[in-house]
Amino acid sequence: MSHPLLAQIKENLMKGKANDVKALCEKAVAEKLGVKQILDEGLIAAMAVIGDKFKRNEVYVPEVLIAARAMNAGMSVLKPLLKQAGVKARGKICLGTVKGDLHDIGKNLVGMMLEGAGYEVVDLGVNVEPEKFVSAAQQHKPDIIAMSALLTTTMGAMKSTVEALKAAGSKARTMVGGAPLTDSFAKEIGASGYAPDAASAVDLANKLMAA
Ligand code: B1M
């Protein structure tokens, strides 16, 4: 049976109550609950439920954004303690919208869900040139490079990026997503995987980390 405070954190996060989540995390820390336990059984567990509901169209973008804000409020309490305790992120992901493309709402949602699942996300922003992905791969040594595109005209930049990363000898796996994409396109350009939505992006990242 998990601690009642953890159940309260989970419940309040799913309702998007940022101030309550923050206060409950502070209380849990004061009551000497493990910081990893608060993260896994409180914050991450709640975001996983939100992700599943989002996949099933039981909640929509605004609810996910509000839950992610509550997650961040809880993380502001836990982050310094996680560092102290030497708790490692599940993996590191460099994320960006590809060259020529300025759409970032979906990318940001993907980033929030990944962070909510325990990943360290380096957000490279929008209109990210292949060379910038390559230098980010060299600088941050991510496990995964994640690319978003919303325009049919910018999908080609994903191919150039995957090629540039391979040419530079990057060992990072690559994942792609965005409204005009398909699984077969991802295979065609040699990406490691495709996810149709932000919650599936977490499943895919987990799969790529395990591979
Ligand atoms: Co743009 N736009 N837009 N736009 N815009 C679309 C994408 C479009 C479909 C509208 C239309 O014509 N019906 C169309 C693209 C057509 C096409 O190529 N197929 C279009 C166009 C043409 C343009 C311009 C060219 C318009 C113009 O100037 N003539 C221009 C291009 C600018 C540029 O990028 N260079 C443009 C500009 C803009 C705004 C700046 C005004 C604004 C963007 C604001 C911003 O992002 N900060 C905008 C918006 C808002 C849209 C629509 C309306 C909404 C996009 C969105 O945010 N959706 C869009 C029409 C539509 O989709 N109804 C449209 C919500 C978001 C949560 O969903 O981004 O799909 P989405 O992300 C999902 C999944 O796709 C997936 O997960 C997310 C959550 O589930 N996903 C990933 C996304 N990235 C992923 C990465 C992953 C995994 C999953 O792994 C790494």
Image (cartoon, grey):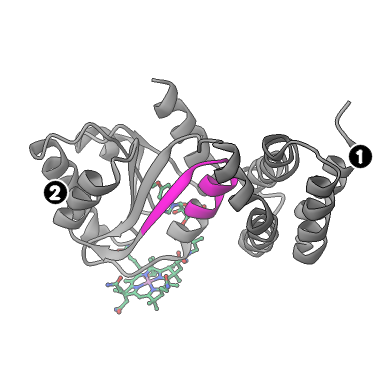
Q: Nearer the viewer, residue 114 or 19?
A: 19
Residue 138 placement, left or right of 123: left
Please say if 201 is above or below 12.
above
Residue 128 at x, y = what percent?
Answer: 24, 61
Badge 2 is on which residue? 160
Badge 1 is on which residue? 4
Q: Amino acid at mark 2?
A: Ser
- The residue at 30%/46% (across/down) is 140
Residue 119 at x, y = what percent?
Answer: 50, 42
Q: Amino acid at mark 1?
A: Pro
Residue 69 at x, y = what percent?
Answer: 65, 63
SS for callout 2: helix
The quadrant of the image that shows the N terminus is top right
Q: Nearer the viewer, residue 60 or 125?
A: 125
**Nearest-to-viewer mark from 1 and 2:** 1
Q: Residues within 10 Å of mark 1 (few under 14, many from 20)?
A: few
Does the magenta-highlighted stretch encompass residue 117? yes
Q: Which residues are magenta?
A: 111-123
Residue 147 placement, left or right of 52: left
To which quarter of the image does residue 12 belong?
bottom right
Q: Residues within 10 Å of mark 2 (few under 14, many from 20)?
A: some
Q: Residue furthest left?
A: 167
- The residue at 64%/54% (across/down) is 75
